[in-house]
Image (cartoon, helix red, strand yellow):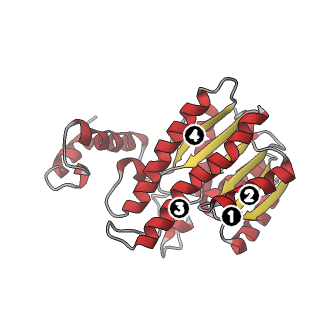
Amino acid sequence: MTHAAFSPLNVAIVTGAASGIGLAAAQHFAGLGMRVVLADVDGDRLDAAAAAVAAAGAAEVLAVVTDVGDLNSVEALRDAVLARFGRVHVLMNNAGIQPGSGITGPRQNWERVLSVNLWGVINGSQAFAPGMIAHGEPALIINTGSKQGITTPPGDPAYNVAKAGVKVFTEALQHDLRNREGCRVSAHLFIPGFVFTPLTAKDRTDKPAGAWTPAQTVDFMMTSVARGDFYILCPDNEVDRATDEKRIQWAAGDIIGNRPPLSRWHPDYGQAFKAFLDQN
């Protein structure tokens, strides 16, 4: 059963829609007969994506070049959508970048990652949520997080900080929405696994065996939303749900057990983590 927000002629907005998971989501929504708004900073790829979404069966398509890290740009997107369609039923704050980062810099990478990956979610939610609440019809806000924002592996701290912020913000957003009398909007944290997209492909042209396709990931998201899941924790062909749960549990255990931070990667705790993972 599909959530009521995904009804034909309802309006869905997807940021980061020019490729990857965003494009797959927009095409899926189009196949449901929705009116689909694609937002992305890449105007050239956005035009091609809009054509693909129209071909997938969208009732209408609107493409708007948008920098989600710029509040003025997001508000211009909102104004364009409301002028065209009047209301929004699905908002998928999905835009993300991953240029790489280190603790001591380069600073511009930190600023851009936090701007897009965290402020993009905040800007989108704050710009669209009031109108979605006010129109009174079933509606959804889906924010794309990451397992890296939960287990925070070493190697890309700016990305981890941004995605950890998305988790915390989306939890707070859902708490706020569920405590508003008569509110029919819910928020959901979308946590993809290993997905073969332009963001993860690097120099690869063929999908690794361990990765899911964007379409598989969106299918999982839709099934999870239909169940009412808040945490949409996606597996992939390498990592199953049980392994994800143990990794998350171990990360939380660093605080409870007063272990060193990121003990999963600490030389004194590597064997203990492996033994924990191997437990039934």
Specify whether residue 59 is in view: no
Residue 272 point in image, percent of width and height: 18, 45
Query: In terms of depth relative to the viewer, which is nearer, 244 or 172?
Result: 172
Q: Which residue is mark 1?
A: 66
Task: Name which of mark 2 and mark 4 comes first in the sequence.
Answer: 2
Residue reaching furthest to the left: 268
Name the spot of residue 160 as percent of width and height, x first: 40, 56
**Residues at marks 4 and 3, CA–CA distance in whole angstroms:** 21 Å
Q: Residues within 10 Å of mark 3 (few under 14, many from 20)?
A: many
The CA span between labels 1 and 3 is: 13 Å
Q: Residue at x 80, y 59 (%)?
A: 62
- Between the C-alphas of marks 1 and 4, the distance is 22 Å
Mark 1 is surrounded, within 10 Å at the Cα level, by few (under 14), some (14 to 19) or many (20 or more) other residues, namely many
Give me the disc on residue 188. 4
Type of amino acid under label 4: His
Q: Is residue 113 visible?
A: yes
Which disc number belongs to residue 115?
Answer: 3
Real-space Cα separation, disc 2 to disc 4, in angstroms? 22 Å
Disc 1 versus disc 2: distance between alpha carbons? 7 Å
